[in-house]
Amino acid sequence: MKNITIAIDGFSSTGKSTIAKELATKLKYVYVDSGAMYRAVTLYAMQQNLISEDKIFIKDLIKVLKDIKLAFKFNVILGFAEIYLNGVNVETEIRNMKVSRLVSKVAEIPEVRKKLVEQQQEMGMNKGVVMDGRDIGTVVFPDAELKIFMTASAEKRAKRRFDEFMERGEQVTFAETLKNVEYRDHIDTTRKDSPLIKAEDAIEIDNSALTRKEQFEKVYKLAIEIIESV
Ligand code: DC
């Protein structure tokens, strides 16, 4: 059977990565979390004091982009690839509230997007990849055989993210989490370079009322239909 490329885009906390990971495992494909790459660049900018809540030194960040090496290494215990920033595993650190608050600002920078899109395209060169993000079906893999666009209400998504924060013991309120989700929706959909939009040929799935299993089955069925037809 021929390998295909699967692009899963959508708003933050729609459960894209959960579905993408499950799909990749089931199809024995490579899973790439493109959001993790934007988060890792943000973490690097934080470590270099190039970004804070009220300031971002865009020119300086662009200058040091060449020093940022991102890699994914498969963790057999977790069953998916974790992200490494210059050789250090930052999979957990990039999910904290501070990175979540700052990442949209970094993801707006065209030079950052260019660098990451190139690396993403390289990772998907041989197909057999499931990649999730915001611009995968529109910019990274416009020729992907299967494009999914996931949506869910902001409240539902904030509740999911809030539960994750609670599990990790982060000190945040639900109101703060909801505000962050809405803020990121706004920046993601209104930025000049590669805003979050549904590709014309993407299949939209609103998962507000779907269980994880129902959602997975829907996407898996679509993938198999396409794989069998190519
Ligand atoms: O999927 P996520 O919430 O981990 O993504 C983090 C941020 O990165 C999000 O605010 C938007 C940005 N992003 C992007 O601009 N393009 C992508 N392909 C993936 C993520």
Image: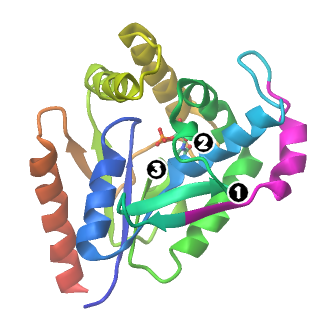
Tag 2 residue:
39
- Which secondary structure, mark 2? helix
Residue 39 coordinates in the image, percent (x, y): 60, 42
Q: Is the residue marked by circle 3 packed among few (<14), some (14-19), or many (20+) residues within 10 Å?
A: many
Is 110 rendered above or below residue 1?
above
Question: Which segment is the magenta one?
Answer: 56-72
- Marks 3 and 2, how far apart in space? 12 Å
Residue 151 coordinates in the image, percent (x, y): 29, 38
Say what amino acid the circle numbered 2 marks.
Arg
Say what amino acid the circle numbered 3 marks.
Gly
Tag 3 residue:
133
Residue 9 coordinates in the image, percent (x, y): 39, 50
Q: Is residue 23 left or right of residue 35?
A: left
In contact (CB < 8 Å): disc 3 and disc 2: no
As for residue 122 lying within the magenta part, the answer is no
Tag 1 residue:
114
Q: Nearer the viewer, residue 196 or 35?
A: 35
- Which secondary structure, mark 3? strand
